[in-house]
Amino acid sequence: MSLFKKLFKQTFIYGLATVLPRMLSFILVPIYTKVMPPGSYGEVTLIFSWFAIFNVILAYGMETGFFRFFNGEDDKNKVVATSLISLTVSTVLFTILALLFQFQMAELLNIEQRYIKYVIFILALDALAIIPFAWLRANERPMRYAMVKTVNVAVNLGLNIFFLLLLPGLADVNPESLLNAIYIADFEISYIFISNLIASGITLLMMGGLYLKSTYTFDKALWLKMIKYGMPVMIAGIAFTINEVFDRILLVDLLPQDIAKSEMGKYSACYKLALFMTLFATAFRLGIEPFFFSHSSSDHPQRAYAQITNYFVVLGSVILLTVVVFADILKVIFIQDQAYWEAMPIVPVIVLASFCLGIYHNLSVWYKVTDRTQFGAYISIVGALITIGINYLFIPDWGYYASAFATLAAYGSMMVISYLFGRKYYPIPYNFRKITFYLGLSILFAALSFYVFNRNLIIGSALLLVFLILLYKMENETLKRIFLAGIIGKKNST
């Protein structure tokens, strides 16, 4: 139980590192829609979609490769140095080539040329911080990780508020001041990326100590093994990113141009209500990924992996039902402009899709600890093909509904395929009956609350209460053991 106590402690801290910054950044959505017309907001959303794709390419699987060999090699400094050298060289080469061909890059990505330099430098700074962040996670320093992540988004948020909300008024009141000199009208999108650039620069400065401490010993043989291990991860990451953001790009491309960005804006805003499930799944993954590798050589690790997945499904089912039941309250809090509410019917679909993705991450342990990462790439490619296929076929007729169901179909398929392959190559004794029960019941209650009873809050709350009572009755002993283990651990530490 001590292993699980440690795991949940790290997951909680990583959760704070993920939840707090993303909740802060979520505040930017109403700010952006307040100060910019839909076309400008669409431009920002499009650029951030490309950010996600390029972040994966510039990392090329080195983060996961770092975890794999950091835990497996006796000389850990060699792993750190080789990783840092590799990413530094590749990032410098990317920056030089991107600047040389910035006009062609802007045209290819359908980004206005005046923003492309911001994009290039932000991508470069973020790439250089990949290994320092991975080093913190590998050395189980979640507090430092959480602090840096929180500072990053706090700086980003503060600068956005200053540039977009405060600066115009201050410059108008003080026309002779320095503030008026730095204020430029209709410069909102540039201010957004200037804020991102400064935040990324500060983050790299905070994490730069690892670059100073490194021995800079490059091991070519180790690097080749890391590349071999990481390339399938990169392919899988690109496929994942296609599932996450490519629907926005396709909505703009496939819908009539007079409504495309408006429809994409509605879809993106309501998609944000799945944030709570995404945050939970991401925090859980950040906590368990080092755990998977560090305990892969212990006695019967499959039992621990099975229990972890059971806990994830139990907690995820509660989050799924809670978000769906209180969706109308959440939309008022987070999406205050009623023009966006037209897309609310996609919310349960997207929350369920995010849940399936989280389950998939738990099931993916089999190919990571057995060095069969190519299967992760294969499965992700299947998901990406489903995403692209459904979007291309049905967006012209169904609009963003096609994008929502494409996301669910992709993540659901990946979850099932991973489970089936895992049974063959690395059997884990999952409690399939329990997982199916919680998942199925939460989906049934969510569908009843949202679609059958038309989001009636009283009926939805009653269904949630019934679910929680069943959960308590079935998991009472497990919850007590975890709670008692935590109390005993605290007493022993004192």
Image (cartoon, rainbow, N blue to C red):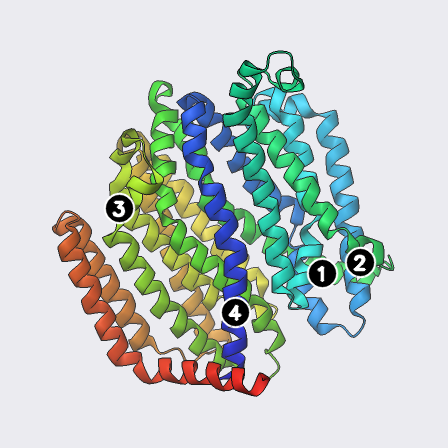
Is 200 situated left or right of 455 in this image?
right
Q: Nearer the viewer, residue 443 or 184?
A: 184
How far, Cα to Cα, is label 4 from label 1?
A: 18 Å
Q: Position of residue 420 (x, y in %)?
A: 41, 69
Q: Nearer the viewer, mark 1 or mark 3?
A: 3
Mark closer to the chain start, 1 or 3? 1
Mark closer to the chain start, 4 or 1? 1
Amino acid, disc 2: Thr
User: Residue 82, labelled with which disc?
Assistant: 2
- Residue visible at 60% across and 51% down in the picture: 149
How far, Cα to Cα, is label 1 from label 3?
A: 47 Å
Is 271 situated left or right of 206 in this image?
left
Of helix, strand and loop, which one carries label 3?
helix
How far, Cα to Cα, is label 2 from label 1?
A: 9 Å
User: Residue 226, labelled with which disc?
Assistant: 1
Amino acid, disc 1: Met
Task: For label 2, count other residues whose C-alpha is less than 10 Å away and answer few (under 14), some (14-19) or many (20+).
Answer: many
Amino acid, disc 4: Val
Q: Are marks 2 and 1 in contact (CB under 8 Å)?
A: yes
Q: Nearer the viewer, mark 3 or mark 2?
A: 3
Q: Nearer the viewer, residue 153 or 375?
A: 153
Report which residue position mark 4 lands on. 365
Mark closer to the chain start, 3 or 4? 3
Report which residue position mark 3 lands on. 329
- Residue visible at 33% across and 40% down in the picture: 270
Q: Is residue 493 above or below residue 83?
A: below
Q: Are marks 1 and 3 in contact (CB under 8 Å)?
A: no
How far, Cα to Cα, is label 3 from label 2?
A: 50 Å
